[in-house]
Structures are given as structure tokens and as C-alpha cells.
Image (cartoon, helix red, strand yellow):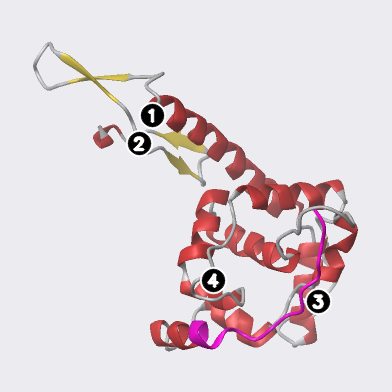
Amino acid sequence: MSLHPQSFTDVPLETARVAHAAFPQGNIYMRMRDEIGGIYEDEAFAPLFSARGQPAEAPWRLALVTIMQYAEGLPDRQAADAVRSRIDWKYALNLELTDSGFDHTVLSEFRARLITGSAEQLLLEVFLQRCRDRKLLKARGRQRTDSTHVLAAIRVLNRLECVGETLRHALNRGVVGIRVKTGHSKAASYCSLTRLTIAPTTDRLTVPLNAC
């Protein structure tokens, strides 16, 4: 993957109009965009990419998605869906309303690049510096800052999602069936599950039997 740096631009007019109509008072992501502006710059991630290859998604945008993903405890697939469907996310990411986003696998690939390039500290350090520059944070003594736990938490969610997607695929292909007793009858039926749920707070995979 090659990097073609993109400059930070204004929020598209239609995105801004619809976002302010939907959130007259704004919300946390819209206020973050308005108060802090551009948090990350593509040039800061240049060492993580090669000079040749398919153009990569803007790393400043992937970094911001990673932060918002962690804030809401979303697995990669749901975070990618939020980029496509949520107006407040499009506002924070400077995207047109019609932007289709990217595949969810791009997020795990981006995190892998951060770790491989020993740049995992970059997300938190740059974010904190932007907040300090705008006097949104005040120094209260020395404290160690570490963004490793952010990446680790998302990595756990990503692994759980892989398990869930594997089971979903197996069930939909009819490889696995779950036998469910029907009332007081001795008869039994088989059903194919179409939904698997991951509980981020407990790291448990739950299967809703009522989906049968």
C-alpha cells in the first residue's frame, strides 16, 4: 500500500447542513471536529507505507475512526458501518453523505501497520498535544500516557468478531446445526442462526436462540 497524503479540508456543505439539522446542539464528534479541527496528518504516518502499491485510505481518517471505535466499543465491522451510515461520523471525518466508506478489514490492517512500525503511541500523543494546544487540557503533574491498551482492546474485539464471523459462515452453510426442543413435543427441529452477538464488556460470544 502506498500513501498519497491528503490535506485536511472543510466539512462538505451538504454533510454540514444535514448534520446540524439532525443535531442542532451538536454531539461529541461534531464538537471535537469544530473545536480541535484536524487532529492527525497523513505525513505523520508516511514511514508506515511504501512508495509503491495501491493507494491507501487516508491514515488521518483511519486514526480518527480508531479513536471513535474505541470510545464506543465497536468491532471493526460495526465501525466501518458507522462510517457509511452515521452523519456525525461523516461530519468528523469530512466525508460526503454519499461516501461509501471502506471495508472493515482496512482497520485491522491499519492497526497492524502501527504496531509493526512501533507507532502505536502516536494516536494518543498527537491527540493530547492537539488538546493542549487549544487549552482543553491543563497540566497537573507528570503522568505516563500509553495508547497500547486502546489497540489491545480493539484487537480483542477484532478476534472475537473473527470467531463470530466464522461461526456465522459455518451455520449459514449448513455445516453446523443447533438442535432446539419445541415445547413439550418430542419432535426436534434444526435451525440456522443468522445472528451472533459479541458482548465487548465480557468478551463472550452469545447466540440468540430466539433468532431461529
Find disc 3 in the rendering and name its residue: 129
| Earlier residue among tags 4 and 2 | 4
Local crowd size for mark 4, using a 10 Å CA cut-off: few (<14), some (14–19), many (≥20): many
| Amino acid type, label 1 | Asn
Tag 2 residue = 194
Residues under labels 4 and 2: Cα distance?
28 Å
Residue stretch in magenta? 1-16
For the residues labelled 2 and 1, the Cα–Cα distance comes to: 7 Å
**CA distance separating discs 2 and 3:** 44 Å
Q: Is mark 2 in CB contact (under 8 Å) with mark 1?
A: yes
C-beta proximity under 8 Å, tags 4 and 3: no
Give the mark nearer the N terminus: 2 vs 1.
1
Residue 172, label in figure: 1
Q: What kind of residue is marked 2?
A: Thr
Q: Are marks 1 and 4 in contact (CB under 8 Å)?
A: no
Query: Which residue occupies 40% across, 25% down?
Result: 173
Tell me the SS state at disc 4: helix
> Which type of secondary structure does the marked residue at label 3 adopt?
helix
